[in-house]
């Protein structure tokens, strides 16, 4: 299986915050934003492994700023690291309103597993980090994975 670069996995999607997407205060619902991020991350994982994928975990969602009605959202997703059958996807959401600079409003990590026709996990291509930022994200993904697995083990052993 041929390894791929991070650049080959990049997906960007855009959406606009509509009145039906907001809470009583006029800002985008967190759940709506998570749904958009999950769809974009799914496309990045699919692009990387060229196989069906499913979300297995959502980690470290950080809502940084609110986004009011009319905000144009850009969701950026790419594979940070590929393990045997899973991939960590890094996400960044930026917001734009006319006359204002782009602002980061949310960051998160999602883990996807590639699945075969019978729904069983299957191997994925390795990822090749090229830039310093990609290498940092690649290394940090291993730290997050170890923490997830340790927490899972602790919770299941009780």
Image (spheres, helix red, strand yellow):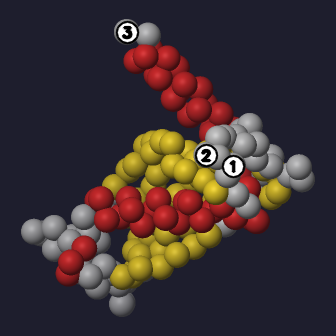
Label 2 SS: loop
Residue ID at (57%, 73%): 12
Q: Which mark is residue 119?
A: 2
Q: Write down the quadrant of residue 63 in the picture.
A: bottom left
Q: Which residue is mark 1?
A: 116
Q: Quick one: 103 or 49, which is closer to the camera?
A: 49
Residue 5 as seen in the image, left or right of residue 93: right
Residue 86 against residue 145 in the figure, above or below? below
Label 2 neighbour load within 10 Å: few <14, some 14-19, many 20+ = few
Tag shown at residue 158: 3
- Spatial distance from mark 2 to mark 1, Cα to Cα? 5 Å
Label 1: element kind: loop
Q: Secondary structure at mark 3?
A: loop
Q: Which mark is residue 30?
A: none
Q: State yes or no: discs 2 and 1 in contact (Cβ < 8 Å).
A: yes
Of badges 2 and 3, nearer the viewer stands 2
> Residue 53 versus residue 87: which sits nearer the camera?
53
Name the quarter where the C terminus is drawn: top left
Residue 85 visible in the picture:
yes
């Amino acid at each position: 299986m041929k390894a791929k670069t991070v650049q080959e996995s990049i997906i960007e999607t855009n959406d606009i915050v509509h009145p039906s997407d907001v809470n009583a205060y006029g800002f985008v619902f967190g759940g709506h934003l998570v749904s958009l991020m999950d769809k974009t991350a799914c496309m990045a994982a699919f692009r990387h492994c060229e196989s069906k994928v499913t979300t297995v975990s959502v980690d470290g969602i950080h809502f940084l700023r609110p986004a009011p009605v009319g905000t144009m959202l850009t969701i950026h997703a790419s594979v940070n690291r590929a393990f045997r059958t899973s991939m960590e996807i890094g996400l960044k959401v930026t917001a734009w309103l006319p006359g204002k600079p782009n602002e980061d409003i949310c960051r998160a990590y999602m883990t996807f597993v590639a699945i075969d026709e019978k729904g069983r996990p299957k191997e994925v291509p390795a990822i090749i980090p090229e830039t310093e930022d990609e290498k940092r994200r690649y290394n940090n993904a291993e730290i997050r994975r170890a923490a997830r697995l340790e927490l899972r083990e602790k919770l299941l052993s009780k």
